[in-house]
Amino acid sequence: MFVQMVIQIPILLFAGAMFSTYEYFKKTLSKMNHINVYGLSGLMLAQMILIYWMLPLNIDRAVVIPWVDGAKVISMVLAGLLVGEALQKSPVTIQLFFIGYFSAMMVWLGLYFLHTDLRLCNAYSLNSQHWTGYGLIFISIFTLAYWSFRVVKNKSSI
């Protein structure tokens, strides 16, 4: 559980965000500009993909069914592409809304994983669930701090 939710999913998101800087993906994503004004549609879709893969039932399915794991990999890279492209075109207030929502969701889920005595994923132990809770809280704090640093750095260079 820890490896999937705290290591694999963030790496896939980051890879997708890095792919969004390549010219081929920029051209492909720019064709959707009429429905992705200010990056809102991309951020909404990426948020829905993230929420789907944060559900313990779907994490269990990804462990047991190989094609579901493949779908997870593809959808997380797609979410990263959408986030990377949306962060380039959205104003700071929209970014703050989505980063804040993401951070709050991750902290809540991390605290829930930490404090529940129920094993939420059948494929993983309770100890793995608790470590995942710590990891999700760390990811949330790191993401919010990195985004804040990036915004302050960009504002000072203007």
Image (spheres, rainbow, N blue to C red):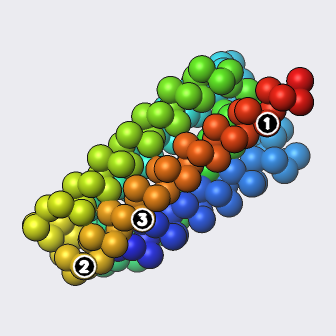
Secondary structure under badge 1? Answer: helix
Q: CA distance from mark 3 to mark 1?
A: 26 Å
Mark 3, residue position = 135
Q: Position of residue 110 (x, y in %)?
A: 32, 56
Could you tell me how far apart the alpha carbons at marks 2 and 1 are, in whole angstroms? 39 Å
Corner quadrant of residue 126: bottom left
Task: Where is residue 133? Give x, y as percent.
Answer: 32, 63
Locate residue 50 relative to residue 142 in the image: left or right.
left
For residue 110, side relative to residue 94 (left or right): left
Label 3: which secondary element: helix
Residue toward you, 58 or 6? 6
**Disc 3: CA contacts within 10 A as few (<14), some (14-19) or many (>=20):** many
Q: Where residue 35 sits: x, y (%)?
A: 62, 21
Q: Between 112 and 68, which is closer to the camera in this rendering?
A: 112
Image quarter of residue 19? bottom right
Looking at the image, residue 156 sits to the left or right of residue 56; the answer is right
**In the rendered view of the protein, which quadrant contains the N terminus?**
bottom left
Q: Residue at x 83, y 38 (%)?
A: 27
Q: Which mark is residue 153?
A: 1
Query: Which element type, helix, strand or loop, lies under badge 2?
Result: helix
Q: Which residue is mark 2?
A: 127
Q: CA distance from mark 2 to mark 3?
A: 12 Å
Is residue 41 something that shows in the picture?
no
Q: Is residue 96 above or below residue 28?
A: above
Camera-nearest label, 3 or 1: 1
Earlier sequence position, callout 2 versus callout 1: 2
2 vs 1, front mark: 1
